Amino acid sequence: MAVWSERMLIEKIKKACNTEAEGLIASIGDDCCEIKASGSFLISTDSLIDSVHFNRDFHPPHLLGRKSIAVNLSDIAAMGGRPRFVLLSLCLPEDLEWEWIVAWLDGALEILKEYNCVLIGGDTVKAGELAFTVTVLGEPGAASAAIYRSGAKDGDTVWVSGVLGSAGAGLGLLSSDQLTSDFLKSLDGSLLEAHLNPVPKVALGLKLAQSGMVSSMQDISDGLATDLAHICGASGVSSIIDFKLLPYHLDLHTVADILETTVEDLILRAGEDYQLLFTVMKGKESELCDFLQAKQQEITRIGRVCSGKGVFLQKKVGIEEITFQGYEH
Amino acid sequence: MAVWSERMLIEKIKKACNTEAEGLIASIGDDCCEIKASGSFLISTDSLIDSVHFNRDFHPPHLLGRKSIAVNLSDIAAMGGRPRFVLLSLCLPEDLEWEWIVAWLDGALEILKEYNCVLIGGDTVKAGELAFTVTVLGEPGAASAAIYRSGAKDGDTVWVSGVLGSAGAGLGLLSSDQLTSDFLKSLDGSLLEAHLNPVPKVALGLKLAQSGMVSSMQDISDGLATDLAHICGASGVSSIIDFKLLPYHLDLHTVADILETTVEDLILRAGEDYQLLFTVMKGKESELCDFLQAKQQEITRIGRVCSGKGVFLQKKVGIEEITFQGYEH
């Protein structure tokens, strides 16, 4: 275990900080960073706590560094924005290995680079508990405004990107004491990957904002049942989703059996998929698909927006209410 | 002990969040907040950790709420900016009393209101360790640019606001097991107050920026010896300060004896004074005093900027180097 000091860490972060990005006036080294502003800024802050939001027993630090940033980039994607700047607040226990910290930081910097987003500052403190607070600033995409949760209207349709339930399945598998690593390796890697290394849907979010056909949007962090309830609550509408339309990885059946849960629970309530959940303006569905197909983005219509309150699930037999049945972070 | 849930807390914070402040497009309730941008934004983020940055045994939650915000407002003041928006990330242990949380939040909201700064969002999570991460956004004052650490020049003079060492003395007294509360009450309250409830120097910082006569500035959080070293390092200069010019509360002599330390240590190395440390352009000293006297701001010249490297202390007999001898947060 290499000994480390806050000064070592700050020096490493300083070196990693961009000082010459577009719109960046002053980076790390002053009491504040300073960024040039035009139009508007989207801002989000999220804290990830050891043993609450992640498990170091199975989460490699490099992937955890990526994920700590990814979940924040996903918040910008959820508004149809372009991530620009990040501030990191690292709370690190004294006995944390320097190699672990370096791997975490390398992962964080790697994904920031992929999304053309710049680390501009933050804070490092010694703490009893490992925790990361990431603040991200973004801008609405060129020639488009941000998309809020409040714009869904009766008659709109409900859509998601990608597949649902994979992250919950991955977390369940990784958390299970009874599975051998050989068994885990035999699975399609995408379930584990969905938990360990989620991909923020930034390009898709931007494209959806540019389309002008999306009436509301957010990312799926607490599970479809809860996140759709947020949209419905903010928009003053209800929605009904059709179970048979929900997209998921076919291995979910096997995994649900192993984990003694159901595919439905994984899809609707497990959370952390970081897919986009959005509503498309009435009558614009095929036009939107045409607009997006050029980019081969995978989106699926899963239901519709109605007047009233609540989120409902249409199953083979009957309808049940699932409002706010997700995971509470 | 009242039972609480994250939902109770989020509801309370939502109610406290302004939704209609100037420049605020979208407040809490979406994946991001959105603020209107013009000119530039100053941004700072700081984490305060239980038992590292504060001690709940003697820090009343209401004052700790104020201080958690104040130290961030001080970062904006240190750039000559006007605080505008705040995001809070609260990491709260499950067994924390609801009354404590409410008192903390009331203190935080109270000081935000005093500085016309608006809570726009954040995150609340349950954690093993109590921690607050505050992100503050500000704007340079009207008709003035931000002031950086890097502008000090040979021939400038070094100044501070207020008195130094009070916060360190206050913390020392509050931390001492041997002092009765009767004795503490017999002291001038300003030493304890300096630790428990520091006042960010926002109005003075703005005025200094508006003067156009200040070449560099930061706040004193790590102690004069370290913070002046930051300015000298960023500016590529050295400085020499004169011990007999340093302003401090006269009780510091008694307190230094009680705490078995020295007045010099409290002034130079204890930190957390949150006073402004700045350099005034050569030949502008009396003009600046005239400019500020209208507002009766208390500032003191304590030394001068020279070429070279390092921070030096002129004492009755001889000069010693004190570069980076402050407290490392």
Image (spheres, coloured by chain):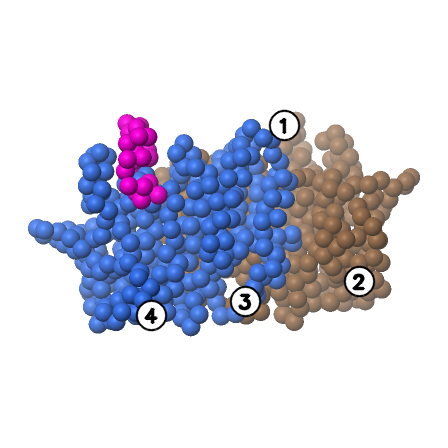
Chain colours: A blue, B brown
**Residue marked by disc 3:** A37
Q: Secondary structure at mark 1?
A: loop
The residues bearing labels 4 and 1 have C-alpha atoms spaced at a distance of: 66 Å
**Residue marked by disc 1:** B177
Question: Residue B13 location in percent, x, y?
Answer: 42, 53
The residues bearing labels 2 and 1 have C-alpha atoms spaced at a distance of: 46 Å
- Residue B281, label in figure: 2
- Residue B125, label in figure: none
Report the amino acid beneath label 1: Asp
Question: Residue B109 location in percent, x, y?
Answer: 50, 54
Viewer-nearest residue: B74 or A28:
A28
The residues bearing labels 2 and 4 have C-alpha atoms spaced at a distance of: 53 Å
**Residue marked by disc 4:** A211
Q: Nearer the viewer, mark 4 or mark 1?
A: 4
Q: What range of the chain is rendered magenta?
A: A172-193
> Quadrant location of the N terminus of chain A?
top right
Residue B207 in view, yes or no: no
